[in-house]
Amino acid sequence: MPATFNVTLVIEDLELNDDNLDRLFDALPDAVPADIAGLVTVESPVDADTAESAAFALIDTITDLFPEALPCRLDQDLVAIPDIASRADRSRESVRLLVDGKRGPGSFPPPVGTVGDGIRVWPWAVVVDWFAEALGEEIDDPGIPPQVASVVDACLAARRHRLAHRQTVVWHSGSSGARKLPVSAADTKSRYVLSA
């Protein structure tokens, strides 16, 4: 049964001008594009059977709309305790107690890293899953789990490497069906295939 996944894609060679935004919103009315210091992202809810299928569906849509665009990676939407508190509609202290195992069932996922002065961060998708499984709270649509994001990112990295050498990329994934993505704007007849 399809679910709705929040997917955020980092894209190079895409200008968010009025024409491109019109095309984007015609295809993805709920998309949230951003350009922060030259880093372009497009976030969109995607209905799919699996997180992997959702990620590749957004990649397909973006590359179909903008053949010159180069999808780079999925954004993991890293969050700290204040972000979790805001998004989950809880106090910072409530979230800190959940994270430290002093409230709730414990077993809050370990952070993926720290930034700044020891600020712990987690992928939002992991936090959403934990709230659903451990507390029975649906605080957001599921996102792309880090394990799936790493597979998708590897595929996109292989594509970028092949682009640099103008080779065809063949990618076999666990998703059902085959998907084709343009290799580059200069060579749109070269494609790689994602197949079961």
Image (cartoon, helix red, strand yellow):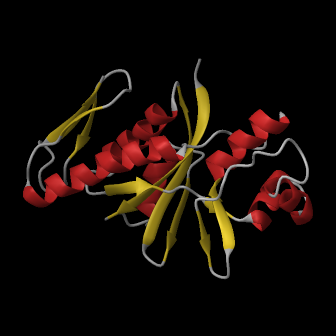
Q: Residue at x 87, y 54 (%)?
A: 89
Name the quarter where the C terminus is drawn. Answer: top left
**Residue 69, position in %: x, y?**
31, 57
**Residue 104, position in %: x, y?**
89, 45
Q: Looking at the image, which is closer to me, 125 or 180? A: 125
Q: Residue furthest top?
A: 1
Q: Looking at the image, which is closer to me, 188 or 29? A: 188
Image: 175 above or below 58: above
Quadrant location of residue 174? top left
| 71 on left or right of 99 | left
Quadrant location of residue 95? bottom right
Count of numbered badges drawn on the protein: 0
Q: Residue at x 8, y 57 (%)?
A: 165
Q: Residue at x 15, y 46 (%)?
A: 188
Name the quarter where the N terminus is drawn. Answer: top right
**Residue 26, position in %: x, y?**
49, 44
**Residue 118, position in %: x, y?**
67, 76
Q: Is there any visible trace of residue 138 in the rendered image?
A: no
Image: 77 above or below 47: below
Q: Looking at the image, which is closer to me, 148 or 140? A: 148
Q: Is there any visible trace of residue 156 in the rendered image?
A: yes
Image: 8 above or below 93: above
Q: Residue furthest left?
A: 166
Q: Residue at x 23, y 50 (%)?
A: 158
| 192 on left or right of 154 | left
